Amino acid sequence: MKKIISVVGARPNFMKVAPIHKAFQKLVTRHSSLVTHKICHTGQHYDDKMSKIFFDELEMPKPDFYLGVGSGSHAEQTARVIIEFEKILLSEKPDLVIVVGDVNSTIACALTAVKLGIKVAHVEAGLRSFDRTMPEEINRILTDSISDYLFVTEKSGLENLKREGVSEDKMFFTGNVMIDSIVNFLSKVENSKILENLFLLPFNFLLVTLHRPSNVDSEKNLKNIINLLNSLSKKIKIIFPVHPRTRKNLESFGLLETLNSNIILTEPLGYIDFIALVKNSSLVLTDSGGIQEETTYLGVPCVTLRATTERPVTVDIGTNYLVGEDTHAAEKVCRDILANQFKKGQIPEFWDGHAAERIANILLNDQR
Ligand code: UD1
């Protein structure tokens, strides 16, 4: 019997671990003595709207362990996770820890496990933006370098790992677990009432998300983005679910009052309503990592307010446009898209709803 603990910490982790848990549950139903799968929530994100709603909607069980680390500087947050997670590992003694994505909880838990001689699997390995000013890039590089299993979502990830000298027997091209969640919950998404609630017609609004420190912690950059939104909102209604980091800065820079009335701010939304908005929007303007993938899968044009992406397949064959921090360039691309000039895009290989099953099968059959 293999004992496995998967870690979630921040919002983008939940929709990645939900399908992994489901895949293990399926295996348990068939061979009850094969695996025990437990979930540890570090508490990096803790608001109901940033955390609990995802457990409910994604049909995940209550976490077996909750570390309650909360917010803080990078050092404080990472250190608190390490201290608390070590206690769990010492008492549970799992065979394997699964970490996903690139948040502080990812590297903190991978490091804690590996130092105790526990094997680590990293889901969403190999992605590189080549921008080391991003905290996530540091988290990705370090996590990959100490993991025993590297599960890769797109081929660029395999190339990056090979270039960094990772041995091929650690790498597995298994596809994208985030897409598994969209596939699993598409019927719930179809039943969402969010369009009616916000008085929206399909393909008649632009959806915005912003949370990256480089965009929202700088007053100048955030002001430029708000000017962009004000200008675009003269042409189309804008829906803007606001991340807590972004709300704080909009308030402290005095920018909330400057927003045009055609821009509708909401609290952070749950998974089902958010995907329903993405699926029905004319265009998504974002600085998120995962939303670049979700728009590509759903065939919705995406304009990414970043200079680099660790997910190049979304630009090469998907619907994503990378416009950097130049809001004039962003405005031109957005206007072209709203005038119906945009690439249609294709779905990348193995973004098919079965990535988590591939991962679970590899982990249970591998004897290392
Ligand atoms: C974190 C991840 C980022 C991910 C993002 C998704 C790191 C380094 N960053 O960034 O990769 O894309 O999550 O959201 O791990 N806050 C609340 N309630 C919460 C959580 C946060 O109010 O439930 C506020 C706190 O004031 C906190 C701030 O938001 O200081 C930022 O939270 P934090 O977890 O530090 O980083 P994110 O910007 O969310």
Image (spheres, helix red, strand yellow):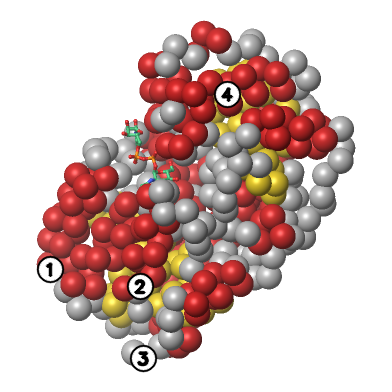
**Which callout, 4 or 3, points to the residue nearer the camera?**
4
Badge 4 element: helix
Amino acid, disc 1: Leu
Distance between mark 3 and mark 2 Cα atoms = 21 Å
- Residue 367, numbered circle: 3
Hey, which quadrant is residue 61 in on the image? Answer: bottom left
Q: Is residue 357 rendered to the left or right of residue 138? A: right
Tell which circle, 4 or 3, labels the residue nearer the N-terminal end. Answer: 4
Q: Is residue 284 rendered to the left or right of residue 95? A: right
Mark 1 crowd level (few <14, some 14–19, many ≥20, 10 Å Cα): few
Tell which circle, 1 or 3, labels the residue nearer the N-terminal end. Answer: 1
- Residue 90, numbered circle: 1
Q: Residue at x 51, y 57 (%)?
A: 129
Amino acid, disc 4: Asn
Judging by the rendered image, the residue that carries numbered circle 2 is 145
Q: Residue at x 72, y 22 (%)?
A: 232
Q: Residue at x 17, y 49 (%)?
A: 80
Tell which circle, 4 or 1, labels the residue nearer the N-terminal end. Answer: 1
In front of the other: 100 or 270: 100
Q: Percent position (x, y) of residue 302? A: 69, 43
Q: Percent position (x, y) of residue 12? A: 46, 49
Judging by the rendered image, the residue that carries numbered circle 4 is 224
Distance between mark 4 and mark 1 Cα atoms = 49 Å
Tell which circle, 4 or 2, labels the residue nearer the N-terminal end. Answer: 2
Distance between mark 2 and mark 1 Cα atoms = 23 Å
**Which callout, 4 or 2, points to the residue nearer the camera?**
4
**Which callout, 2 or 1, points to the residue nearer the camera?**
2
In front of the other: 143 or 15: 143
